[in-house]
Amino acid sequence: MTDLAHAEPATGLPVIDLARFGPDRERFLGDLRAAAHEVGFFYLVGHGVPAELTERLFAVARRFFALPEAERLEIENVRSPHFRGYTRTGTERTAGAADWREQLDIGPERAALDKPSPAYLRLVGPNQWPSALPELRETVLAWQAEALRVSRAVLRALSAALGQDDAYFDRWFDDEAAIHLKVVHYPPRRSTDQGVGAHKDYGYLALLQQDEIGGLQVRRGDTWIDVGPLPGAFVVNIGELLEIATGGYLKATDHRVLSQPVDRYSVPFFLAPRLDAVVEPLPLPPALAARARGVTQDADNPLLAAYGEKALLGWLRSHPRVAERWWSDLDPAG
């Protein structure tokens, strides 16, 4: 039985075992290619992230969101021109509407650049950490390093599955790569309204660690399907840069989160390249190129090959309070 046949019953999403990349390489690459091409979302097991680290991550996340509001607002993101820090419930927007979540945005630990140009380089800067919970920093950065390792391994496997050398994308993932993660709390809500609105991720890959509460949905055709938690697994999805690189052979897929009547916690990690990366068409083998579906054309969500421009546009639209305070010289509509 192949990995593609091994699917979580409630959703039908493929389950891919990363541990097969070495000993069962060709069959593994076929299964991964099918999952990424046909669905764009899959569960990932065999990744080697210690369960103990994941448990510590969620424990410290719950402790952070249980802090008094004043201690969370000490690191509110409006204090950061780099969009780092704590976001109050209802102040991030997706698809033009407010999301019902509070979160902590974290990226690599870097100093802000002196007089950066182009404008997107102003995104580079330090994180904010709560003084009341010093252990948050160590735990989150340790998990971020593991998520980076895993997502880079998946990207290398996808490169091989698309007929390229494993290291095809590596030049964009040096110490300046613009990775980031969100530590997210969805407060209880009786109605199943927007936790996070429908969207696509604009990097290469996203890797999600869920708690035991559902709420994530993925669009399959005209239908939204539930993607519940699978113990020990990440949920991985294709980002817009891979859609651009493959001419639509791989597609970034719409997904959303519906509010739940109980607290929900999740940690998505976004594998993004250097801000100055410009995605070039990948030379697909003829058999795959013949099945490429073209890049999505959407006036409300243009897919841009220049990553820094796309990332900055996304941040400005999603966080209007930060944009107003620190980026008033730019047009958030692009």
Image (cartoon, grey):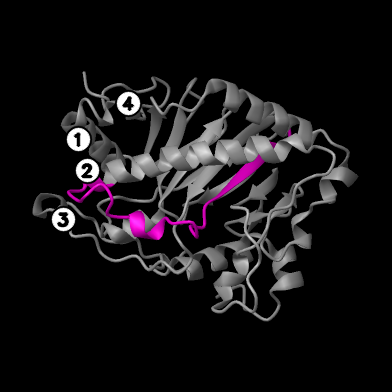
Judge whether residue 99 can be spotted in this image.
no
Whether residue 157 is visible: yes
Q: Would residue 68 be found to the left or right of residue 278 on screen?
A: right
Label 2 CA crowd tier, 10 Å (few <14, some 14–19, many 20+): many
Q: Nearer the viewer, residue 301 or 88?
A: 88
The residue carrying mark 4 is: 19
| Numbered disc total | 4
Separation (CA) of disc 1 from disc 4: 14 Å
Q: CA gap, disc 2 to disc 3?
A: 13 Å
> What kind of residue is marked 3?
Ala
What's the mark number on residue 30?
Answer: 1
Q: Which amino acid does the dot numbered 2 rest on? A: Ala
Question: Between marks 3 and 1, how big is the CA–CA gap?
Answer: 16 Å
* Residues rendered magenta in the picture: 159-188
User: Label 1 is placed on what type of residue?
Assistant: Gly
Is 204 situated above or below 133? below
The mark nearer the N terminus, 2 or 1, is 1
Closer mark to the observer between disc 1 and disc 4: 4
Q: For the N terminus, which image quadrant?
A: top left
Badge 4 marks a residue whose secondary structure is helix
Magenta run includes residue 80: no
Residue 289: numbered disc: 3
Q: Which residue is mark 2?
A: 161
Q: Residues within 10 Å of mark 3 (few under 14, many from 20)?
A: some
